Amino acid sequence: MILRFFRRNDGSETIQRLYGAIVAHSRQPVFYTDYAVPDTIEGRFEMILVHAFLLFHRLKSEDEARRGLGQGVFDAFCTDMDANLREMGVGDLTVPKKMKKVAEAFYGRIAAYEPPVEAGDVGALAEAVLRNVHGSHTAHADEARAFAHYMIGAAAALRAVPFARFAAGDFPLAPPAALGSTETDPS
């Protein structure tokens, strides 16, 4: 038992804390109540993708060694998705096919979210959110637009966070404002 204090930290605890924070943030009820994210497996998956994207978007400005933290979080995400698929009863032969779709979804979301977040283009990001999170249900256009504002604001807030916070396993992201509050800009 005492030997664990002498083991070298390989960063796995930090990575698990970061990934756990992404998942915890993704489960905040306000996403499902105010932003009309479907409270389904797919909706929760989309929220994890959004928050993982926000972390990776922040880490992309770091040097290669520091960006390795993002790779560790991505690996933890893949391990978690694999375990969840198996827990839901997906067979061993089907899991690799499903994991390929998970990876395609992840990289597709990055390609869809990165340019509008970088440009601060609420309209383009709202379209991507409507398509990916809301399944193109135009009845949720206002929520998608508000969610785009949230993502752009969160990305800006994370840019101001020193890398040391992430390296310590912290994902300091403020909870989203409830729609109708004065903190959300619905324009």
Image (cartoon, rainbow, N blue to C red):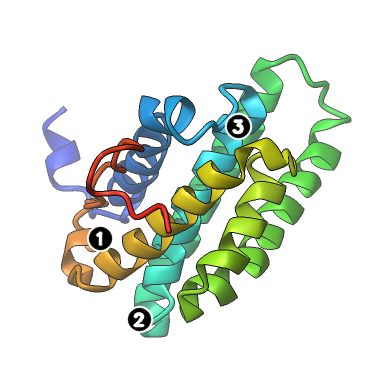
Residue 97 position (above or below residue 39): below
Is there CB contact under 8 Å for labels 1 and 2? no
Q: Secondary structure at mark 2?
A: loop
Work out whether residue 173 can be spotted.
yes
| Circle 2 crowding by C-alpha within 10 Å: few under 14, some 14–19, many from 20 | few
- Estimate the x, y position of residue 187 in percent, counting from the top left: 43, 59
Answer with left or right where residue 86 lies relative to residue 116: right
Is there CB contact under 8 Å for labels 2 and 3? no
Circle 1 residue: 166
Circle 2 residue: 62
Q: Residue at x 56, y 22 (%)?
A: 39
- Closer to the chain start, of discs 2 and 3, is 3
Give the distance between the C-alpha atoms of the residues marked 2 and 3, in whole angstroms: 30 Å
Q: Secondary structure at mark 3?
A: helix
Front position in the image: 121 or 26: 121
| Circle 1 crowding by C-alpha within 10 Å: few under 14, some 14–19, many from 20 | many
Q: In front: mark 3 or mark 1?
A: 3
- What amino acid is labelled 1 in the image? Phe
Front position in the image: 53 or 117: 117
Give the distance between the C-alpha atoms of the residues marked 3 and 1, in whole angstroms: 26 Å
Give the distance between the C-alpha atoms of the residues marked 1 and 2, in whole angstroms: 11 Å
Q: Residue at x 23, y 54 (%)?
A: 8
- Estimate the x, y position of residue 66 in percent, counting from the top left: 34, 75
Circle 3 residue: 43
Q: Residue at x 79, y 46 (%)?
A: 101
